[in-house]
Image (cartoon, grey):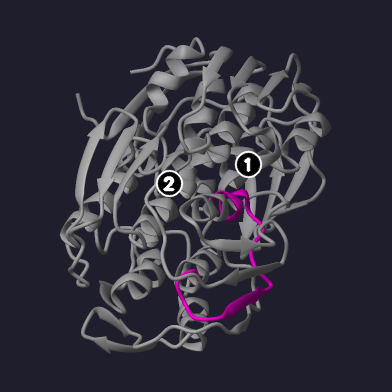
């Protein structure tokens, strides 16, 4: 059977309990942070996804030793000595860029291919480079390679004109071993920033203010290897919670830091769901056609995440009324629209806006995933559609969902 194809006969109802996988967006910067210390790291609940596999490959090319035992990764950084990041994964994923800060901190030089893996927009790296230059780094371009060096990293006052998660992470990683104090103004406030800060503090770094727009890092001389448990993935969780709405399901997610979901639980209630939650669990029930959302805009945390916009659009395509979505983060996030239209959705989009008139039901069709989150959104739509849906492009989905088929089977879904 083709691994890059998935077949779903609907409609089906999601119901049951699930332990959510480890966070992709937390695991990748944590792996980059490990470069900063000399020792053996043990990381638990590390997701088995292709982006993590690629990152581990890159670390091996730099000289690290890697062993994976299920969801536990043992990473030995003591022999890291190569500043040239190569390998088949080097140009495939966006998070390669996060190695700039940590490699400059550890070896004071780095060479990486220009990062790839993203089909949802341009995602320029100017914020990364301008901030790292303020810390003392120099950069030059050689063909398709970005080369960086820093004889000495020093503290600085850095103002980000947009709260970029990747740039905030990169600057934190470069600053922790620098001389003096670094203050990042306009920093991203996403939960993954707080997770990275917690991990760095456990290593011995002095970081404060994470979760606010102003992060302060006081440089230290040395960091230590640690053992750490990666939290559950808030985007995977959000996907399944939205899946519960579109299938009129009953889903409980366990061992999930609910505060990482931001405003999502309130949005689910607005759409008609019954939501109960505790510190580390959330239970969502939906028994009727969901209500539309007159206007929703994607925004940095704690606003509605762009990574859940595709799954939300799938849900709103069956809502009882008209919804309006504005995408303010990535310019090519509406690649799911023509595929949903094939399934009978009524969506008109132009530039960064989409107008969705809910229909009573979707129909199965042959569709194509063109990026990670859009693929997950199409799978949620397929669960509610009448008839068989065949989706190509599962290789995109595997970048962030370690076993979406297995998860859905645990929630009562028959899937091939």
| Residue 181 included in the magenta stretch of the image | yes
Q: Which residues are magenta?
A: 176-195
Residue at 77% over, 23% down: 275
If the image is split into quadrants, where does the N terminus sit? top left
SS state under label 2: helix
Image quadrant of residue 7?
Answer: top left
Residue lying at 43% horizontally and 14% vertically, measured from the top left:
409
Disc on res. 27 = 2
Q: Is residue 13 visible?
A: no
Identify the residue at image location x=69%, y=58%.
299
Residue 4 higher or lower than 413, as above or below = below
Where is residue 175 shown, x and y percent of the image? 50, 73
In the rendered structure, the answer to whether residue 318 lies left or right of residue 145 reads right
x and y, in percent, of residue 178 in the image: 47, 77
> Tag 1's secondary structure?
helix
Image height of 283 relative to 74, above or below: above
- The residue closer to the viewer here, 17 or 348, is 17
């Amino acid at each position: 059977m083709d691994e890059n194809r998935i077949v779903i006969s609907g409609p089906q109802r999601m119901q049951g309990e699930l332990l959510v996988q480890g966070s992709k967006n937390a695991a990748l910067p944590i792996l980059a942070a490990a470069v900063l210390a000399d020792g053996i790291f043990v990381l638990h609940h590390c997701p088995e996804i292709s982006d993590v596999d690629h990152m581990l490959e890159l670390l091996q090319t730099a000289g690290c030793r890697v062993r994976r035992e299920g969801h536990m990764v043992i990473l030995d950084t003591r022999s890291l000595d190569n500043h040239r990041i190569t390998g088949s994964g080097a140009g495939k994923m966006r998070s390669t860029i996060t190695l700039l800060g940590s490699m400059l901190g550890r070896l004071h030089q780095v060479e990486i291919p220009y990062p790839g893996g993203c089909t949802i927009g341009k995602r320029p790296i100017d914020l990364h480079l301008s901030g790292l230059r303020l810390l003392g780094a120099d950069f030059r371009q050689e063909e398709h390679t970005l080369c960086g060096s820093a004889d000495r990293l020093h503290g600085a006052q850095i103002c980000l004109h947009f709260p970029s998660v990747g740039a905030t992470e990169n600057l934190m990683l470069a600053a922790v071993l620098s001389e003096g104090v670094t203050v990042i103004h306009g920093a991203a406030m996403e939960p993954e920033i707080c997770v990275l800060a917690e991990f760095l503090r456990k290593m011995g770094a002095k970081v404060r203010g994470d979760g606010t727009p102003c992060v302060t890092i006081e440089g230290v001389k040395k960091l230590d290897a640690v053992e750490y448990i990666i939290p559950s993935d808030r985007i995977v969780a959000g996907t399944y919670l939205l899946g519960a709405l579109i299938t009129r399901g009953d889903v409980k997610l366990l061992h999930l830091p609910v505060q990482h979901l931001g405003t999502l639980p309130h949005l689910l209630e607005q759409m008609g769901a019954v939501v109960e939650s505790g510190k580390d669990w959330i239970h969502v029930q939906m028994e009727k056609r969901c209500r539309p959302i007159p206007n929703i805009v994607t925004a940095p945390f704690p606003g509605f995440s762009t990574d859940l916009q595709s799954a939300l659009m799938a849900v709103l395509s069956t809502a009882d009324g008209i919804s309006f979505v504005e995408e303010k983060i990535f310019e090519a996030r509406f690649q799911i629209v023509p595929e949903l239209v094939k399934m009978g959705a009524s969506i008109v989009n132009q530039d960064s806006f989409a107008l969705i008139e809910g229909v009573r039901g979707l129909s199965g069709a042959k569709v194509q995933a063109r990026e990670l989150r859009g693929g997950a959104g199409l799978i949620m739509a397929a669960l509610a559609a009448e008839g068989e849906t065949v989706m190509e492009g599962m290789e995109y989905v595997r970048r962030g969902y370690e076993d979406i088929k297995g998860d859905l089977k645990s929630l009562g879904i028959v899937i091939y």
